[in-house]
Amino acid sequence: MSESGRSILIVGGGTAGWLSAAYLAKALALRDNAHLTITLLESPDIGTIGVGEGTFPTIRETLRFLDIDEGQFIREASATFKQGILFSDWLHAPSPAKRHRYFHPFEAPFYSEDTSLVPYWLLQDEQSRPSFAEAVTIQNKVAGAKRGPKRPDEPAFDGPLNYAYHVDAASLARLLRERALSLGVRHITGEVADVSLRPDGAIAEVRTTAGAGFTADLYVDCTGFRSELIGKALESPFRSVRDTLFTNRALTCRVGYEDPDTPIESYTLATAHAAGWTWDIGLAGARGIGCVYSSDHLDDDQALAVLRDYVGPQFNEGAVKTIGFDVGYREQQWVKNCVAIGLSAGFLEPLEATGLVLIEAAVGMVAELFPHHGPVDAPARRFSKLMSARFDSIVKFLKLHYCLSQRDEAFWRDNVAASTVPDELKDLLEQWRYRPPGRFDFILDVESFAFFNYQYILYGMGFRTDLSAGRSDFPKVAAAQKLFERIQAFGDKAARDLPSHRTLISQMSVAAA
């Protein structure tokens, strides 16, 4: 290890590798520091998993930080806007007379300086009140009308509504690669053949099948599920959470639009089935669809039938890809001189699109904790503790979607069983019977989701918070009603005035050309 300079070797490309490379190059001012080198070693034979990937609103600040133009990003990553997730059939199995849906928007519930609308919504008549998302934000109506979250002439990465994107993962990786190279990252292709260790257990060298050897002060493992460095070489223990989250397989496909002007939804559609759920993501040129399921409750042939029924006449069995995944994470994600980012660190199923936000959190932390001199493993314990806590908090949030279901299939009954629900979530659910989720329920530095995200899921799934005994504590009924009416009026106006989602994408792509 040299005290006169630092070298970073990122092993693996894809979204995790190239985002890590670009972010670290920018954060560490690679171009201005001759003593610092960042090299990315990428296998030429391993492709990107997925047929469309959802992101989190944090991606806007990441792209802004990387000085990537929003219009260029939309055009080159085949991106569309995402305003949330529409959940269908999660509470009840569908029937001709009954189908349950609810929306989880990115926009926080509206509030004034002295009035929170949540308790006033909870105290309204359950039979006549609008859905929670419709009552407290205009985003429900905007997304429902297939409108975009902004106008094309508004500032980059800004708009009247909170938003993220749907992207083609391979196209995003190419865009990030271009940005990383422009920031001074060195790119080498080769397949890892061997990882040798020093006497102290740290990585000494990474060798390729072509015989080339690479050494670095810090190794970043972005090798995906193979986890070549942190898993195979350093044997960091993997903590499975399959006793809480049951899905472990997905069948994916891409379905083209019959008409090139077909409206594009600006949300992920998540439709529950007997043993999991199906995602449906609208990209500019096609829909990315995936059937997520538990192999303990559904076999591959049955899952294929679910996907076939969902897609309909356009289904092409020959184009279906199968993805298996272990649900969990490495307990130590920074071991000695190696840190894992992306799938090599862990994966918690596709629900709520947490894969990329975990990459963002990890690389942001590496950039801030990176030791410019001294022991390179000094931040390891802190990093691993914070990332493990973040994984745990996401497990809790994802389980919330399942454990409130009233479906009677085995998969859903097992998800409701108390033995599969984390103790902390059970404790919070008991508290939330008497008060809504609040900000002091969570430690912000290890959370990917805010308290209002929990509110959207809870009340979308019909959870009851009983405030009736304290009704007199909420006397501003008239003021709250005026706010509810204003939200409805603003929602109607926004659904009329904002451009259609497809029009917005087209105009921003053309402007960036």
Image (tube, rainbow, N blue to C red):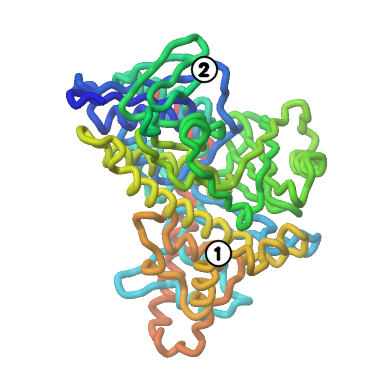
Report whether 96 appears left or right of 501: right
Residue on which the image places disc 1: 422
Residue 340, relative to residue 428: is it above or below? Answer: above
Image disc number at residue 191: 2
Question: Which three-letter amino acid code belongs to the residue tagged 1?
Answer: Pro
Q: What residue lies at 50% left-to-right and 25% top-to-bottom?
A: 171
Between 446 and 326, the residue placed more toward the observer is 326
Cα–Cα span, label 2 and label 1: 40 Å
* Label 2 SS: loop
Examine the rendering and report whether any part of residue 353 can be seen. no
Q: Quadrant of the C terminus?
A: top left
Report whether 448 appears left or right of 53: left
Q: Quadrant of residue 446?
A: bottom left
Examine the rendering and report whether any part of residue 462 can be seen. yes
Q: Quadrant of residue 204?
A: top left
Q: What residue lies at 67% left-to-right and 59% top-to-bottom?
A: 90
Between 232 and 220, the residue placed more toward the observer is 232
Q: What residue lies at 50% left-to-right and 21% top-to-bottom?
A: 194
Question: Which three-letter amino acid code belongs to the residue tagged 2?
Answer: Glu
Residue 396 locus on image (x, y percent): 52, 59
Q: What residue lies at 29% left-to-right and 24% top-to-bottom?
A: 7
* Label 1 SS: loop
